[in-house]
Amino acid sequence: MVNSIEQVSLSRRQFLKATGWSAAGITVLSSCSGILPALPSTSDPELEDAFNWFQLLPTGKVRFFCPRIEMGQGTTISLSQVVAEELNVDFANIECLAASTEQVPPFKMTVGSEGIAKFWKPVAYGAAKLRETLRERASHLTGIHVKNITDTHNGFKIENTRIIHYHNLLSDTPFLLMEIDASEVKDVALYSLLSSRSKHHIGHNRVSSAIENIVTGTEIYARDFNLTDTLFGHVFRPPALEAVIQSVNLKNAQNKDGVIHIEQQIEKNLVAVVAKDPISLRLAIERINITWQKSDINSTELIEKINVNKLIQQGELEHVLVDDGVSKGLSNNLKIIKSCYSSPCMSHASMEARAATAWVRQDKVEIWCGSQDPFFVKSRIAKQLGRNLDNVVVHSLRVGGGFGGRVLCQPAEEAALLSKLVGKPVKVEWSREDEFQNNYFQPPFSHMIEAGVRSDGYIEYWRHDFASSPIITGPIPSSIAWMVDSFKADEGTARGSHNPYNIKNKRIRYSDVRTKVPIGAWRGLGSAPNCFAIESMMDELAHEAGIDPLDFRLHNLSSYHEVLKKVLIVLGKMKPANQKQKQQSANDIENDHGYGLACAIYKNETPVAVAVEVIIDHSEQSVLVRNINCVQDCGAIVNPQQVENQVMGNLVWGCSMAMKEKITFEEGQVIENNFDGYQILRHAECPAINIELIKSDKPATGAGEAALGPVAAAIANAVFDATGVRVRNLPIRYEDLFNGKQN
């Protein structure tokens, strides 16, 4: 997707007002990179953008308007460490703020494990330019050449004798650097990236200043935000996909105390109510009776549309990723395996049900919400209300879990509509059931892989066909989706489908089929479903060849993938890693134990390998993951503890995905519409986890989603090791292992 960006500039007065200047300071400022149309923000950061992200206050504090949305991944912590490193200040002196859309130029939506990989260098450049600008000011004030002004804590040392702190360089008038030439910045030293310089913040653990507020429940999320005189609104959302309103009965709700406004536009499938307080709103909702005509959408129809074998028979696999030939000069002694694999529709299942507050006035529209892309929200609301982009401001609040599901913020659009109708601030809160029914989903995947392995253990050919739905372009309106699909294969659906093995005869094809189910980004996009199929087949081939699964992977990796080889070798030295290291306690002797592994290279950048130990408990009729080992190489690491936390979250989610998560539809209605039906891994089921991060000098790569991919395959392979039953369909459930549903 390509953004159409109109170049604009923030005036000095606008910038100071928007960023809340109340005291003197120094600010780095450049031309704004523009205002986005109603499309997601997909442009990578520019150096000029970074100059807008910093202010040095007279107190010595550094105000950092972070261009990433914080939703638990900790990017704001790590980027604050980069700022502290460049400026030689204490981490506690970095005041990291969530910027509103009027305070900074548009920045790329927070997705794809890109926070450190793509924003480390721009943040470092901006902070370094601020540092060097201060050095020049110190030179001007003291008459000493900049070469004789060296770094020290919170400031500079003049000719190795006199100390001058940053705040001593500020006057009572804010100092703005406007229209900075990017070429000047490229010449400054980036302390956070210099391998020869000892680091005070990079590579060290730091904890967010917000952690105490989160633990004590005082952190402000969208549901916690309040304005004086706020009203409370509710839009009646369809109880099923494509359901339409047949009739509405408002008699019991009209003219009731506390009800401010009822909106009814049946032709637009819209009924909404605004009340003075949450209790009055709840009573009004209960009194309004709506009859809906449901749809015929069901899971059987959905699965049939993306059935890869059916599409192969019909010749409808439209996208060819690789075609090196699969029938030329094949050996006679090949052992051939052909298997099908599938994964179901899944939900984001975030802990925070979304909410938003909107205040629509004549001269300004303000939105308070949590979104992975506040500029997308801004653009959508401007278009919805027919306002200029300049009139709409989105204030970002912390997000309680995104995972790709919070790019949109539908309650913000609903609140804006209702606020326009009543002329006052309106808050809209979604219920848990609203979240499960009305957000977009991870699509189901259907795979067929046929491969042949020689007697010497080398894979001679690989034919992988799969089908799913468009993920990145999934949310595009149906009116223009056909046009996008006609020239653009969905890369999100295909993510992770290029296996890393040295196979000369290889063909990979797929189809991204649109259905009536709304589809969008889900953690890692296609990487986990594709890895499940690929690494399950690798285990089948290893078993057929009679070679240890770890050795088999190393045997078939080319020199091009030395980093993945290293990750696998380290994994092999951890216990338990494979069958040779099995150990059973006396209490476990009646249960079946299994060990399995899988690996992948996330986005062709981050190699990761996972080994698991599973227990098949026949008395409880359950599959339990007891231990997980994980090795990951994500390049240079700013905050080791934070990366470990991200890896751990991926591993736990991977267990949940493999063994529990599944969305089904009946007449367009989501059956698993709360956590009693949509099961996720519980604390008591969480395995022991051991993580090894490879020390690396290469640039940082994505860490936030990489480890998710191999988990399901590793568990499935461990189940085979324990039971002899191949898992080919997710989720993995005990009852399916022994009734033939898997094979």
Image (tube, rainbow, N blue to C red):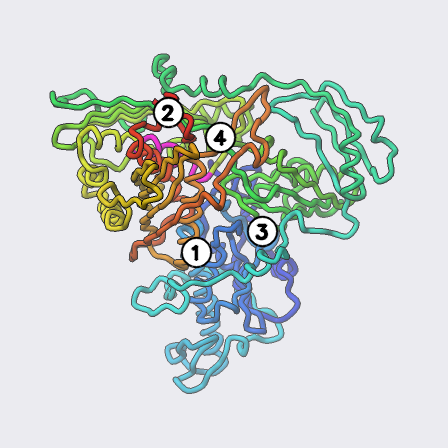
Question: Whole-Å distance between the Cαs marked 4 and 1?
Answer: 29 Å
The image quadrant where one finds the C terminus is top left
The amino acid on which the numbered mark 4 sits, given as a three-letter code, is: Lys
Q: Is residue 249 left or right of residue 638?
A: right
What residue is disc 3 on? 398
Front one among 327 and 341: 341
- At mark 4, the secondary structure is loop
> Where does the image place residue 382, in percent across and percent down from the top left?
65, 40
In terms of secondary structure, what is the magenta stretch mainly? helix
- The dot on residue 642 is 1
What is the x, y in percent for residue 301? 49, 17
The numbered dot on residue 738 is: 2
Place of residue 159 in the rendered image (x, y in percent of width and height, measured from the top left): 39, 84
Horizontally, residue 493 falls left or right of residue 550, namely right
Is label 1 in a helix, a strand or a loop? helix
Q: In the image, which is nearer the foreground, mark 4 or mark 3?
A: 4
- Would you say the residues marked 4 and 1 are in contact, meaning their CB atoms lie under 8 Å apart? no
Q: Give the range drawn in magenta.
A: 523-535
2 or 4: tag closer to the N-terminus: 4
Cα–Cα gap, marks 4 and 3: 27 Å
